[in-house]
Image (tube, coloured by chain):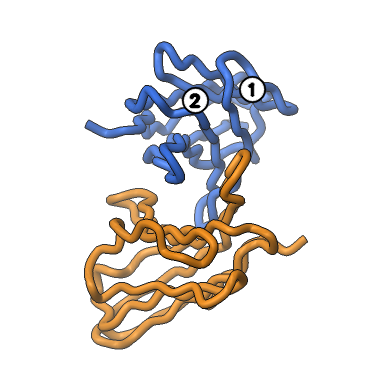
Chain colours: A orange, B blue
Amino acid sequence: DAGVIQSPRHEVTEMGQEVTLRCKPISGHNSLFWYRQTMMRGLELLIYFNNNVPIDDSGMPEDRFSAKMPNASFSTLKIQPSEPRDSAVYFCASSLSTGAREQYFGPGTRLTVT
Amino acid sequence: QKEVEQNSGPLSVPEGAIASLNCTYSDRVSQSFFWYRQYSGKSPELIMSIYSNGDKEDGRFTAQLNKASQYVSLLIRDSQPSDSATYLCAVMEAYKYIFGTGTRLKVLA
């Protein structure tokens, strides 16, 4: 079975450019999470969707960050304009919203903003 | 005060030994606990989940939960060099996972 799919795997961009990260959750999972991981701050939850609806975006660092989930099989995280401090690994994870709620992570997108 | 605390390590153990990783948490109402393994440059991989007090065994891994003392641990028996990784403890609060900063384990051949 396919796990969580993320693209691109690596992104290098210049400060001020728009960046869009993509995620396809595990089929049948109805909860989706976007995380950011840095050495300094560890793994931080950015936003949580349940049944395609954003439930908690309190972790989104500022208005430059936005996320959408137009359907059950696709989500995007957009940064506009990007800044060097946004450089990090961005992970998408999915789970069921009932039962064990075990989260499964995608391979991540390593973002470098120069 | 951090909500989920782990010793950052590195924890070095010889091959074949038992590695013991510990995690404490602050939210008394938490009911679900998870251990993830993360190799350098890779994504976190779920290796154990535990929901009840006591021990849960899966192969060489044993998770231990003590809700009264608010700690959860992971034992790795017969440690192998391939177990060298960072181990993340996660505690579920409502729908959120709260992650610790991870313990780096080094298994010496």
- Which label belongs to residue B25? none
Which mark is first along the chain, 2 or 1? 2
Count of picture labels: 2
What type is the residue that disc 1 sits on?
Answer: Thr
Residue that appears at 66% across and 61% down: A26
Q: Is residue B106 left or right of residue A18?
A: right
Q: Chain of mark 1?
A: B
Residue B1 image-quadrant placement:
top left
Query: What is the secondary structure assignment of the residue under circle 1?
Result: strand
Q: CA distance from mark 1 to mark 2?
A: 10 Å
Pick the front one: B22 or A66:
A66
Q: Residue at x 36, y 52 (%)?
A: A44
Query: Where in the figure is residue A87, as x and y percent of width and height?
Result: 32, 69
Please tell me which residue lies in front, A98 or B45: A98
Chain on which label 2 sits: B
Q: Are marks 1 and 2 on the same chain?
A: yes
Residue type, mark 2 in image: Leu
Residue designated by label 2: B21
- The residue that mark 1 highlights is B62
Image quarter (top left, top right, bottom left or bottom right) of the N terminus of chain A:
bottom right
**Foreground residue among B45 and B33:** B33
Q: Residue at x 24, y 68 (%)?
A: A85
Q: In percent of the image, x 41 and y 37: which residue is there? A: B93
Image location of residue A15, percent across then percent down: 25, 83
| Neighbour tally class for label 2: few under 14, some 14-19, many 20 plus, Cα within 10 Å | many
Residue A38 point in image, percent of width and height? 34, 56
**Where does the image place residue A12, in percent across and percent down from the top left?**
39, 80
Query: Judging from the image, what secondary structure is the residue with disc 2 in?
Result: strand
Task: Classify 10 Å Cα crowding around label 1: few (below 14), some (14-19), many (20 and above).
Answer: some
> Which image quarter: residue B56?
top right
- Please say if B36 is above or below B62: below
